[in-house]
Amino acid sequence: MRFTEHEMTVAVAAVAQQAFETLPGFMRRKVGASTWAELPKMDRYRLLSASSKLLIPGLTALPERPTVGATPEFSADEYAEAAETALRERVDRAEPGAWDATSDRKRRKQVEAAAVTLRAAVEAMPHRQDPDALIVPDHL
């Protein structure tokens, strides 16, 4: 699916922040921050970069769903299919045939985790605007 740059930025930031907040307290203290706002910029960048590498291929693998005034909705199967496509490409790019060599149980767990992450990313996106209804001010 095609998302705007703003939608993807919001999704990546939301997932990165969620990932940081799920870290145990001792790991957050090790980094030197107890909240996302206190996190040093370089550590925040690392989390954002890692989140984007995982999310963007999965988001683009989702089926096209033109929705206006709401975030797009997908079924659990569509999330799982997009997650599996993105994971398969990522793993096979690193080592050809590695995805098929992985056990079914491990693949299933990875796909489930990636699908949950994709769902969280899509739910964090702002409502979509109608591009035909945008009003440009006269001073522009």
Image (tube, rainbow, N blue to C red):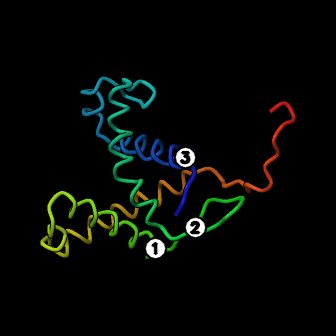
Q: Which residue is mark 2?
A: 73
Q: Are there few (<14), some (14-19), or many (20+) residues within 10 Å of tag 3?
A: few
Picture coordinates of residue 58, whole percent (x, y): 40, 61
Q: Specify the amino acid type for callout 3.
A: Glu
Q: Are there few (<14), some (14-19), or many (20+) residues within 10 Å of tag 1?
A: some
Picture coordinates of residue 38, whole percent (x, y): 41, 24
**How many angstroms separate mark 3 from mark 2 (CA)?**
19 Å
Residue at 62% across, 59% down: 71
Secondary structure of the residue carrying tag 2 is loop
Q: Specify whether 128 is left or right of 45.
A: right
Picture coordinates of residue 1, whole percent (x, y): 52, 64
For residue 89, what is the image quadrant? bottom left
**How many angstroms separate mark 2 from mark 1 (CA)?**
10 Å
Q: Specify the amino acid type for callout 2.
A: Glu
**Contact check, label 2 and label 1, Cβ < 8 Å:** no
Q: Depth-wise, is mark 3 or mark 2 nearer the camera?
A: 3
Q: Earlier in the sequence, mark 2 or mark 1?
A: 2
Q: Earlier in the sequence, mark 1 or mark 3?
A: 3
Q: Which residue is mark 1?
A: 78
Mark seen at residue 5: 3
Give above or below for 116 relative to 27.
below
